[in-house]
């Protein structure tokens, strides 16, 4: 047989598969009605486990792995289809719809906002991108921002969550597990790292450089060229600039932003020293109360799945079955459990879509713990 003959066989097999899938889904719909009438849950773990084992046996050793992957997805699609038919109520979805109705139609121009650091920090620059006239409260650390929101001292907080070069800000993810909050907006800020010194200090005079750990990691190539220079981590790039400005020493420098140069009357002796020109940091704006503004097309969630093979796969297959794009997956260890993690997801999906509503209704049954962090728009 030639290639066309083989493709005709494939086409015929595909037709049979589609016909069988339609019959299967129609039967799934009847099962959904049966379960709904009797108050039975959609998900039957024992039935799926027995069914999957039987399928793998029938597929044989050479195809069992592929059969397991295929039918795990089919099971997920069937559950989603049944849930849609039953239309099981979701308290969380009701809260989300209420937040949409209660939120103002425009993001506020003015607000009291908590940021970590001092004047000139990148968080302050991000805050200025988000608000026209922010009243900024500066905190000593990231937890101070979460605490200020939690205590009602301010309406919003702005925090860095990831950098395109240095990666995720792990402290933020760890704090996310401890505080209740909502992400209401995010912004991407281009980061240019510069060497700032007192006027008259040259590059060869520098014996110590101050900056935040992420800024330092973004400039490793440049820093390798310096000999016998101490690198000292501090809370913030703007704090680093302030340390240099307030010090009597003329042999120290800061890796900081150009805005801090004029703010603290320093000189820039090396510009854009970051390893890559495409260097961005993403900041989130958080609030205590849920706020969902028009156009929200990004959603963040956190969850703990059971520590069993395939648990995360079931969640990922849910996104695939609903056609929802996963743009970020992060894991952080749970402090009170051995070798277990909390997963963080960023999803691209409109908060108004039927796929989003279906996802919210289905997720509780897929994990041990589920936390909705908010739906929002990202400014680029």
Image (cartoon, grey):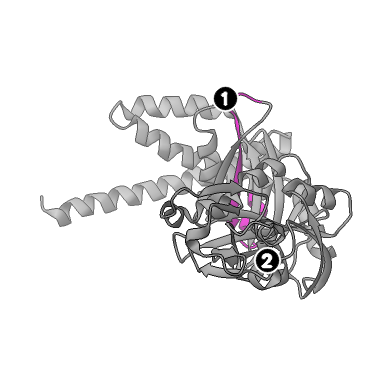
Q: Choose between 362 and 262: the one closer to the eye.
A: 262
Q: Which mark, residue 358? A: none
Q: Residues within 10 Å of mark 2 (few under 14, many from 20)?
A: many
Quadrant in the rendering for residue 215? bottom right
In this rendering, the label closer to the viewer, 2 or 1: 2
- Could you say where residue 159 lies in the image, as x and y percent from the top left? 69, 56
Residue where numbered disc 2 is placed: 126
**Spatial separation of the CA atoms under disc 2 and disc 1:** 50 Å
Foreground residue among 24 and 181: 181
Sequence-wise, which precedes: disc 2 or disc 1?
Answer: 1
Q: Where is residue 17 in the image (x, y as percent from the top left)?
A: 37, 46
Element under disc 2: helix
* Residue at (70% x, 66% y) in the render: 120
At x 16%, y 57%, the residue is 4
Where's residue 49, x and y in %? Answer: 51, 26
Q: Residue 111: within the magenta?
A: no
Q: State the image coordinates of residue 375 (x, y, percent, origin top left).
A: 69, 58
- Reply above or below: 184 against 75: below
Question: Is 183 or 189 nearer to us in this picture?
Answer: 189
Circle 1 sits on which residue?
46
Relative to 62, is 182 above or below? below
Please tell me which residue lies in front, 23 or 57.
Answer: 57
Q: Can residue 380 be seen in this view?
A: no
**Which quarter of the figure is the C terminus placed in?**
bottom right
Lateral position of residue 268 relative to residue 99, left or right: left
Q: Give the range drawn in magenta.
A: 337-359
Query: Which residue reaches farthest left?
Result: 1
Numbered disc 1: secondary structure: helix
Q: Is residue 145 left or right of residue 283?
A: right
């Amino acid at each position: 047989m030639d290639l066309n003959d083989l493709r005709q066989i494939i086409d015929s097999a595909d037709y049979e598969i589609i016909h069988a899938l339609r019959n299967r889904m129609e039967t799934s719909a009847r099962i959904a009605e049966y379960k709904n009438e009797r108050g039975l849950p959609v998900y039957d773990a024992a039935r799926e486990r027995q069914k999957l084992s039987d399928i793998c046996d029938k597929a044989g050793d050479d195809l069992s792995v592929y059969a397991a992957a295929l039918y795990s997805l089919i099971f997920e699609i069937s559950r989603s289809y049944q849930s849609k038919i039953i239309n099981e109520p979701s308290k969380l979805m009701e809260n989300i719809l209420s937040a949409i109705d209660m939120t103002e139609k425009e993001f506020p121009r003015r607000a009291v906002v908590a940021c970590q650091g001092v004047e000139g920090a990148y968080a302050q620059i991000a805050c200025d991108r988000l608000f026209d006239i922010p009243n900024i409260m500066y905190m000593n650390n990231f937890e101070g921002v979460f605490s200020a929101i939690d205590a009602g001292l301010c309406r919003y907080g702005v925090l860095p969550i990831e950098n395109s070069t240095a990666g995720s800000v792990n402290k933020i993810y760890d704090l996310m597990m401890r505080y209740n909050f909502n992400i209401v907006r995010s912004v991407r800020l281009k980061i240019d790292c510069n060497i700032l010194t007192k006027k008259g200090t040259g590059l060869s005079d520098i014996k110590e450089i101050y900056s935040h750990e992420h800024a330092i990691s973004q400039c490793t190539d440049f820093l390798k060229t310096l000999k016998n220079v101490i690198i000292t981590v501090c809370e913030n790039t703007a704090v680093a600039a302030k340390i240099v400005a307030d010090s009597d020493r003329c042999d120290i420098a800061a890796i900081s932003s150009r805005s801090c140069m004029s703010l603290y009357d320093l000189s820039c002796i090396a510009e854009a020293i970051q390893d890559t020109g495409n260097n961005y940091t993403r900041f989130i704006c958080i609030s205590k109360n849920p706020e969902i503004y028009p156009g929200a097309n990004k959603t963040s969630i956190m969850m703990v799945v059971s520590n069993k093979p395939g648990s995360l796969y079931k969640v990922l297959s849910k996104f695939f079955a609903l056609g929802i794009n996963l743009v970020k997956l992060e894991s952080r260890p749970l402090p009170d459990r051995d070798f277990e993690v909390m997963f963080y997801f960023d999803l691209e999906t409109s908060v108004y879509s039927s796929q989003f509503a279906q996802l919210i209704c289905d997720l509780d049954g897929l994990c041990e713990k589920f936390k909705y962090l908010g739906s929002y728009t990202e400014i680029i």
